[in-house]
Amino acid sequence: MEQKRKISLYKKIRRDFHVRVEESEKKHRNKIIALALITLLLASALLFCAALLEKSTKGQYVYYYGDVEQKIKAESETHVVDFIALADFCSMTKEVSINNASFEINNTKASFTNGSDIVKINGISIKMPSAAAIKNGYCLVPLSILERISHGLNIVTDKNETTIQIEGKIFMIAKDFEVSYETDVTEYLEYIHSKDEYIYTLVNKQNPVDRTFPEDQDALIEIPEEYRKSDVIYLHYIAEKALEAMMQDMFACGYNDTYVTSAYRRYDKQQQIFDKYVNDLVNQGMSYNDAYAEVLKDTALPGQSEHQTGLCVDLTTKTIVTVDNRFADTEVFAWLQDNAWKYGFVLRYPEDKVNITGYSYESWHYRFVGYDIAKIMHQTGLCYEEYLENFGDN
Ligand SMILES: [Zn+2]
């Protein structure tokens, strides 16, 4: 009997102990669950706050066009810019209707259409990363497209990418898109794209050079026989290499009766030519002063001719032979109008720039200025003097 009671007491103690242990475990478990719940709540709250914060900073972009501030509500991840505000800042001409917006500066033009991701630059279609939105007096376009289509702007974005500082001025809306050549001109590209200071030399009536120019006579090399008249003609080697690329493509297009009739002309030679023209007129009965004035209209005084730089060529055809404006009626002239810039050459004395260049229209005279400047002159229609005046610092 005694033994039996002992056993049952023992069982009770064991049972009580189990109950206590279970209770304690339960409490512990509840504590953990509560803690987990609190942690979860805190984490969610934190995440929510972070999302809110992010939304509030990503909610709008602040632009500074110089000192002028503009705030734009951000509606997507892509940074946009308001081309209308930009046009006002850069003094562009603008034309905005419900669905279209066009902007023009220095004869270069960009046209956007609402909802379309195509921008037309001087008639060429360029795809943008996202569509343009024309509404509420804005013309919102992807910020990144500016870099591709314009020259002259400096865009700085802060590290949060919400403040965008725009400095400088767009001086043209056009860049080179897919320049193609007729033949493989790879070996000439380094010359076409040369940035050698010499190729920018300006020689005109206001900027003459002396008898000893150019200092480096060794830089003048012969133009290959197939591209010139029978006499040897020299050209500065950079212009000469670019000329070879141009002639090679010109010939490939079927204009193989075109050739260089004059290029580098030394000071003494200019003097001889000038004197000969004056004498010819005097011999025809004109007074010396009148003859001198007449020749001066079309012929440079020694030192005032660009030919002394070795950076320009006079072109003619086997049919025309001499240098005159019959060249303007040829097909090769039309080809040069469209293509000469790709090789760094420009028509130096255009018909509508006589009062600026100081020279009569010379459809045959092409000057090498290098790809970058030739491209801008081609796209803007500026002559070299105008280019230097407007963009000479760039
Ligand atoms: Zn010439």
Image: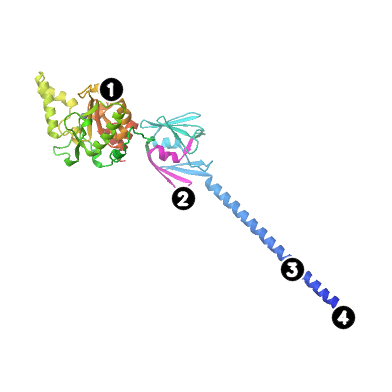
Q: Label 1 amino acid?
A: Thr
Furthest residue in direction bottom, as rendered: 2
Which of the two labelled residues, at mark 4 and mark 3, occupies the earlier sequence position?
4
For residue 36, above or below residue 79: below
State if disc 3 and disc 1 touch (CB < 8 Å).
no
Quadrant containing the C terminus in the rendered view: top left
Q: Residue 54, image x and y in percent?
A: 55, 49
For residue 76, above or below residue 268: below
Q: Label 4 amino acid?
A: Gln
> For the residues carrying marks 1 and 2, which lies nearer the camera in this image?
1
Which of the two labelled residues, at mark 4 and mark 1, occupies the earlier sequence position?
4
Please rate how many residues cluster around mark 2, counting C-alpha atoms within 10 Å: few if below 14, some from 14 to 19, many from 20: few
Q: Is residue 141 magenta?
A: yes
Left or right of 226, for residue 147: right
Label 2 – label 3 distance at C-alpha: 54 Å
Q: Residue 159, image x and y in percent?
A: 46, 50
Q: Residue 97, image x and y in percent?
A: 48, 28
Q: Which mark is residue 3?
A: 4
State if disc 2 and disc 4 touch (CB < 8 Å).
no
Which residue is identified by label 1?
A: 330
Q: Label 3 amino acid?
A: Ser
Which portion, as a residue range, is magenta? 139-168
> Ligand 1 near label 3 (Cβ, under 8 Å)?
no
